[in-house]
Structures are given as structure tokens and as C-alpha cells.
Image (tube, helix red, strand yellow):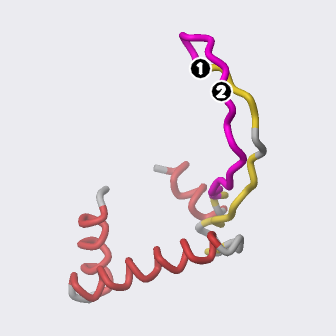
């Protein structure tokens, strides 16, 4: 599902215009992003939790060439699935 399709589906369920729904979706995504940049987690009970995790610097080998490269330390985004979402997907 692409963003436009998602906005269409949400606008139909919520009874809002596509413009209003688009603004709300953009605001939600921006707020989640800001929280993750600030190293905070975002939890939706039953749906899941977005959080960050530090990844240490490491040495890696490029497949096929055996070239060794240094991978810098970074912060990764994690998502832990909530119980209701997990059960709903398992039933489908």
C-alpha cells in the first residue's frame, strides 16, 4: 500500500477529506520521526513500539570481492510488534 492509498483508506474510515487526512498523516509521521531523533520511543498499545538502537562500528567484508571496509557506528530504528497486531496478522 502506497501513501496515497493509505490516505484514501483512512479518509474513508474517518469521514475526513483527503486533504485533512494527508495533513494528519504527515503530522503523525513527522512527530514519530522527531521522537526517534530525540532517542525516545513511541508506543501504540496493541499495535507496537518504535524505538532506536545504537549500532557499533565494525569491519565488514564485501561479498564477491573480499574487500574489507569499515562500517561506521550508527543508530537504527526498531519496531516491536504489539500483541493485537501480531494476532490479527496471524489470523489472516
As drawn, 66 above or below 18: above
Q: Position of residue 53 (x, y in %)?
A: 73, 56
- Neighbour class for label 1 at 10 Å: few (<14), some, many (≥20)? few
Element on which disc 1 rests: loop
| Residue at 78 percent of width and 45 percent of height | 56
Q: Position of residue 54 (x, y in %)?
A: 75, 54
Q: Position of residue 46 (x, y in %)?
A: 63, 70
| Residue at 56 percent of width and 61 percent of height | 85
| Residue at 56 percent of width and 11 percent of height | 65
- Neighbour class for label 2 at 10 Å: few (<14), some, many (≥20)? few
| Residue at 53 percent of width and 58 percent of height | 88
Identify the image quadrant of residue 48.
Answer: bottom right
Residue at which label 1 appears: 62
Q: Of callouts 2 and 1, which one flags the residue occurring earlier in the amino acid sequence?
A: 1
Query: What is the magenta range?
Result: 62-79
Number of the label disc, if any, that sits on residue 16: none
As drawn, 5 above or below 45: above
Callout in the foreground (2, 1) = 2
Element on which disc 2 rests: strand
As drawn, 61 above or below 82: above
Residue at which label 2 appears: 69
Q: Is residue 33 left or right of residue 41?
A: left
The reply to whether dot 2 and dot 1 touch (C-beta < 8 Å) is yes
Q: Position of residue 38 (x, y in %)?
A: 67, 75
Q: Is residue 61 left or right of residue 12?
A: right
Alpha-carbon distance for marks 2 and 1?
Answer: 7 Å
Identify the image quadrant of residue 45.
Answer: bottom right
Camera-side residue: 61 or 7? 61
Amino acid at each position: 500500500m502506497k501513501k496515497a492509498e493509505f490516505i484514501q483508506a483512512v479518509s474513508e474510515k474517518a469521514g475526513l477529506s483527503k486533504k485533512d487526512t494527508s495533513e494528519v498523516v504527515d503530522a503523525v509521521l513527522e512527530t514519530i520521526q522527531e521522537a526517534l531523533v530525540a532517542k525516545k520511543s513511541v508506543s501504540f498499545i496493541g499495535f507496537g513500539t518504535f524505538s532506536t538502537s545504537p549500532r557499533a562500528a565494525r569491519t565488514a567484508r564485501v561479498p564477491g570481492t573480499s574487500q574489507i571496509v569499515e562500517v561506521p557506528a550508527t543508530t537504527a530504528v526498531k519496531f516491536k510488534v504489539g500483541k493485537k497486531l501480531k494476532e490479527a496478522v496471524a489470523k489472516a
